[in-house]
Image (cartoon, helix red, strand yellow):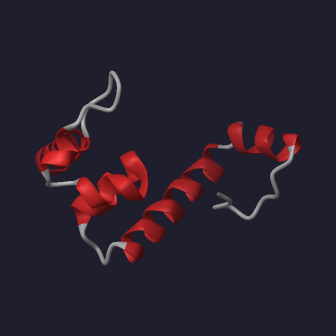
Amino acid sequence: KNLVGLSDTPENRKKFLNSPQLQDQAFDNLLAELNKTYNGDVKKVLGAYYGGGGGAKVVGTPAGDKLQGKYPSINQYVSQILNRINTA
């Protein structure tokens, strides 16, 4: 998804990968979009960031406890991030 106004070309991909500013802009835009989509529900925003729309649907439910391959479950990820935020 285009979050920084660049067309998807090899040249622009290289430009993006070499620009921390563009990466930060994409991250900020993505979080703003997720925040709007999920009406500021931080757990759903984090679930969607980690697992897409399906992650937002299952966060806080038993289905959210399913491991993501060798990675944490949606619920584990959300809890880990919230713990980091609350201790920062």
Where the N terminus falls, by quadrant? Answer: bottom right
**Position of 42 relative to 63 (above/below):** below
Above or below, 82 relative to 36: above
Q: Total of numbered circles in the picture?
A: 0
- In the rendering, at what x and y percent does residue 60 appear? 14, 55
**Is residue 75 in view?**
no
Name the residue at 29% across, 60% down: 57
Q: Which of 72 and 11 is in front in this view?
A: 72
Residue 31 in view: yes
Q: In this view, does 69 lie above or below 33?
A: above
**Residue displayed at 11% across by 45% down:** 87
- Left/right of residue 50 with respect to residue 17 in the rendered view: left
Q: Quadrant of residue 14?
A: top right
Tell me: 24 left or right of 3. Answer: left
Q: Measuring from the top left, give residue 78's x and y in whole percent.
A: 22, 47
- Considering every residue shown, the one lying at the far top of the view is 70
Judging depth in this view, the residue of 15 and 52 nearest the camera is 52
- x, y percent for residue 34: 42, 66
Residue at x 22%, y 54% (from the top left corner): 59
Q: Which residue is drawn at 37% across and 46% down?
A: 50
Estimate the x, y position of residue 23 in percent, counting from the top left: 60, 48
Answer above or below: position of 47 versus 87.
Answer: below
Farthest-out residue, front:
63
Q: Is residue 53 left or right of residue 65?
A: right
Query: 15 or 33, which lies in front?
Result: 33
